[in-house]
Image (cartoon, helix red, strand yellow):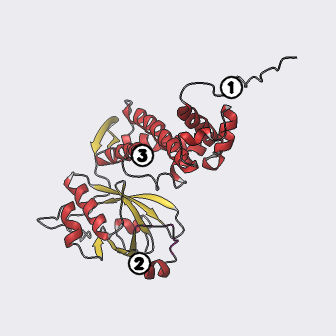
Amino acid sequence: MPLRLARKPSDTYHHGDLRDALVQAAFQEAEQGGPEAINISALAKKLGVSQPAPYRHFADREALLEAVTAEAFRQFTAVLREAIGKPSKQSKLSRFAQAALAFGLRRNGIYRLMFASRAKACAQKGSELHSAALETFSLLLETLEAPAVGLLREGESVDVNVTIGRLPESEEAADTSHDDEPGEGDADADAPEHQELLGLSISPLTEDLRSQYSIGRSVEGVVITEVKPDSPAAQKEVKPGDVIVEVTQEKVKQPADVLARLNAVKKSGRRTVLLLLSDAKGELRFVAVPTS
């Protein structure tokens, strides 16, 4: 009797772009169970390909997670952009916040993949994930720049522009800028190791400071050693021992790096700077701090 060839299930991968098929299948798994649900062996079996096949496109699970997270950020940005682009009496900031919250509640697994895994923090500058996330946070900062706030005056809706978190001009806002601020190229040469800016005192993450604040070995960046009381950073619960990992999506390793990124933000005209902070255990969060 002639041998009969086994048929693949109709829902398995059989032709086309295996890389995209892996990303989409992994995305579906993350949708249901978060980043921990993504398993390359299980995906290969689901798609009906050999176990080594996925590794022709992704070096390891982390590389696949990065591609899936990039797709998540693209979808997140599209949802947010649609929400703030619709005509509404609500401010753009309000619509942005509501859309982000709804996305997180409705698609919790994907939201955790973006903001509770280390995929974003480990992404290289210029990578697919870095670019996708930068687009999302650029949209956030654009929304924060001058949101329209709806007011009711004598029964009629009126829109006014406000500035978020702007400090009084007279306050010593830990603004280390001078009349002739150093550019990015001057920061490494002229800036001392210890810096005070944005209401924060920051230092290189030395072995002594790592030990003093019990900072894990996986955490890298610039350590915060002091936070001025009543500063915007203090109000956002930034504390000594927190580590600045990125400034405006750029990794930092020295206080001079932080200063250079802050100067670049100021020269671009933005009034807020976005910090990615890590606690001693490696838990990450974003904090937006006024630059003046």
Secondary structure of the residue carrying tag 1 is loop
Q: Is residue 205 magenta?
A: no
Whether tag 2 and tag 1 are in contact, CB under 8 A, the answer is no
Q: Amino acid at mark 1?
A: Asp
Report the Cα–Cα distance between label 2 and label 1: 53 Å
Q: Which residues are magenta?
A: 215-221
Whether tag 3 and tag 2 are in contact, CB under 8 A, the answer is no
Mark nearer the viewer, 3 or 2: 2
Marked residue nearer the N-terminal end (3 or 2): 3
Q: Position of residue 120 (x, y in %)?
A: 47, 52
The residue under label 3 is 133
Tell me the crowding category of disc 1: few under 14, some 14 to 19, or many 20 or more residues within 10 angstroms, Cα based. Answer: few
Q: Nearer the viewer, residue 141 or 13?
A: 13
Q: Is residue 20 left or right of residue 29?
A: left
Q: Is residue 2 left or right of residue 260?
A: right
Residue drawn at x 44%, y 52% is 123
Q: Amino acid at mark 3?
A: Ala
The image quadrant where one finds the C terminus is bottom left
Q: Is residue 216 magenta?
A: yes
The image quadrant where one finds the N terminus is top right
Secondary structure of the residue carrying tag 2 is loop
Q: Using the rendered view, name the quadrant where residue 230 is placed.
A: bottom left
**Residue 206 marker:** 2
Residue drawn at x 49%, y 38% is 71
Q: Nearer the viewer, residue 263 or 52?
A: 52
Q: Is residue 272 above or below residue 205?
A: above
Tell me the crowding category of disc 2: few under 14, some 14 to 19, or many 20 or more residues within 10 angstroms, Cα based. Answer: few
